[in-house]
Image (cartoon, rainbow, N blue to C red):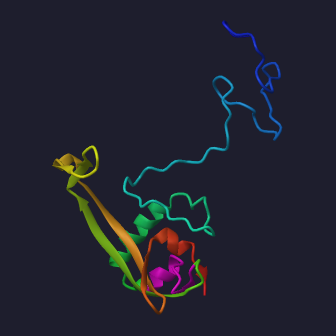
Amino acid sequence: MHVGHDHHHHDQDNGAGAIGVSGRPAFGPGHNQARGPQRVAQWQRAHLDAPALDAGEDAHPEPDLDLVETAFVEAFASASDPTSLLRLAQVPFAAIASDGAKLALLRVEVDAVTDVGSVMPHLGGETFRYDPLPAALVTRRRRLRFIYGDGRAVRALSYAQVKALAPA
């Protein structure tokens, strides 16, 4: 019983560790706070593109994929045999997109991106404020894109999207 309220806690078993219906703890530290399985949060790259998940793609991406992508970019820049590195990284040369289109890998692009300014929209959204970033806030990153052709157009895919492609 707590001071100020005298109700019983849900699934309480007199301090021996409350167990819920699923066999897992019914509540975590604190006052009746439910806990689900915890995933590791990664914040290595502040500029990750928002995940564009199609209905068929996995809702739980591979952990640390951003770190794997960074290592790939570093290795690709100096690889004596880029084709073998693509095979090693399991990048398909021919694949099927989620919409059923047949894709063929045309090129790999690595862009150097440097953010040197910031914009903030004014109320109403018609105008904005621009601020150059001081040197301490300038960010540099590399952007990796795999360019595939489908016979009608080219598609720029991220590393995560390439990993989700079905083999042809």
Residue sticking out furthest to the top: 3
Residue at 51% x, 82% y is 87
The C terminus lies in quadrant: bottom right
Indicate left or right for 57 with 80 as reference: right
The N terminus lies in quadrant: top right
Quarter of the image where one finds residue 55: bottom right
**What x and y, as percent, mark residue 19?**
80, 32
Residue at 57% x, 68% y is 54
Q: Nearer the viewer, residue 130 or 9?
A: 130
Rendered position, 161 above or below 7? below
Indicate left or right for 104 with 31 as reference: left
Q: Visible in this render: residue 132?
A: no
Rendered position, 6 above or below 131? above
Indicate left or right for 103 with 115 as reference: right
**What x and y, as percent, mark residue 130?**
18, 50
Q: Nearer the viewer, residue 161 or 152?
A: 152
**What x and y, as percent, mark residue 36?**
67, 41
Q: Nearer the viewer, residue 82 or 56?
A: 56
Q: Which residues are magenta?
A: 83-97
Q: Visible in this render: residue 56?
A: yes
Residue sticking out furthest to the bottom: 151
Rendered position, 17 above or below 154? above
Quarter of the image where one finds residue 35: top right
How many dots with numbers?
Answer: 0
